[in-house]
Amino acid sequence: MSRMAWPNLSSRTRASTPDAFDALMREHVPALYRSAYRWTGAVDRAEDLVQDVLVRLYPLRDELCRLDQIRPWAMRVMYRIFIDQLRRERSSPLAFGIDFGDADGAGENDSGFVDPAGGPPELAEQQLTQQRIAAAWNLLAEEHRVVLSMHDIEGYSLVELAAMFETPLGTLKSRLHRARARLRGLLAGERFVAADRVQD
Amino acid sequence: MSNDSDALIKGLRAMPTPEPRPGFVDRALANAANAGSHVPAARNTAERAGRRNVALRWEIWLGALVGGAVAAALTVVLMRPTHLQPAERAITLALNEVRDIDVLIDSDRDLTDATIRVAVTGGVALDGMANEHIVDWRTDLGRGPNLLSLPVIARKAGAGQLVAVVEHGGKTRTVMINLTVSGSAAKRS
């Protein structure tokens, strides 16, 4: 009887050693880290998230070497870990102030916020300094950071993200729209930020 | 795209993002390898605690035109190595118990590039993959029995299921195991 290791370490194993895993993943770790940092907004959390991803992927190294593109697959794993972490934090009584049970749902309340629908018409002319964007970024809901990071910064298409995150395309479209609107609102009306965080 | 959207995206892309701290990449890769190397030990522990084996016979594939009723019976009748109790397709786990469930895939020929998909539902998770309820991968199956060990962990009391699907050449075989997690925690030795 031949015994297959879980999930698949067949006799044709090609990446069963730590060195092989290192060779497969090393080039992707910085990119994973940058995305993790954008999603979490903190160095320590980004490192923890990437570490979790690598631990999760290590047993799947044979699968990794069969993939044409490792990074989107790794991103998908990272996203699922991240969302799971968020859910745990939000369900914890100690997680007061962590916002948005559902960033796309009715719980996202923009009332009392600068109307983001049209955005201030002069926004294009404003100088969007890195500091202002970074400050606004840190006030976004995590799901909004993810979609903006992956679509507007990393350049993944919504179709690619829908497959990567296993999320309906329409949901991602509306999430992206809301994320941009939220960011514009934050950039235009920082004075409302505190109230926004408390309400959510 | 409007000017303000362009400006926003340019601003986002210019937003500074730090590189990993020195040594992080090396450390993270080494930690992953170390963590991964502990998996077999955990499996051995589960093995000592006793396995439950479920087998999926494959050769009926070649019979062609296997009807749904026959396929269902296949999963019921041909599921076990000889040393198991005949009726054992429902497995009870203690809360937090980790156990390997063996799926025996018996093929009458080599199956190159078969797809194996495993899904778990209810209070049971794939050990080491707590966030993955469905996992699939491709592999080659040799002629004869192929044993696949699936480590599961009982996370909360209640009923659940483990479903293993093997696909090859447009045909599939499915095996389902009912899993019940009892309310009492597993005893630690």
Image (cartoon, coloured by chain):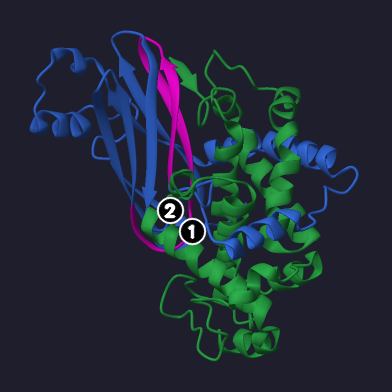
Chain colours: A green, B blue
Chain letter behind tag 2? B
Mark 2 or mark 1, earlier in chain: 2
Towards the viewer: A122 or B58: A122
* Marker disc for residue B155: 1
Q: Are discs 2 and 1 located on one and the same chain?
A: yes
Q: Residue at x 48, y 20 (%)?
A: A3
Disc 2 to disc 1: CB gap under 8 Å: yes
What residue range appears in magenta?
Answer: B134-160
How many C-alpha atoms fall within 10 Å of the one at disc 2: few (<14), some, or many (≥20)?
Answer: many
Residue B140 in the magenta stretch? The answer is yes
Under mark 1, the amino acid is Arg
Provide residue A92's location: percent of width, then percent of height.
59, 76
Is residue B82 visible to us here?
no
* Marker disc for residue B124: 2
Q: Is residue A197 above or below residue A39?
A: below
Towards the viewer: A179 or B25: A179
Provide residue B189's location: percent of width, then percent of height.
62, 51
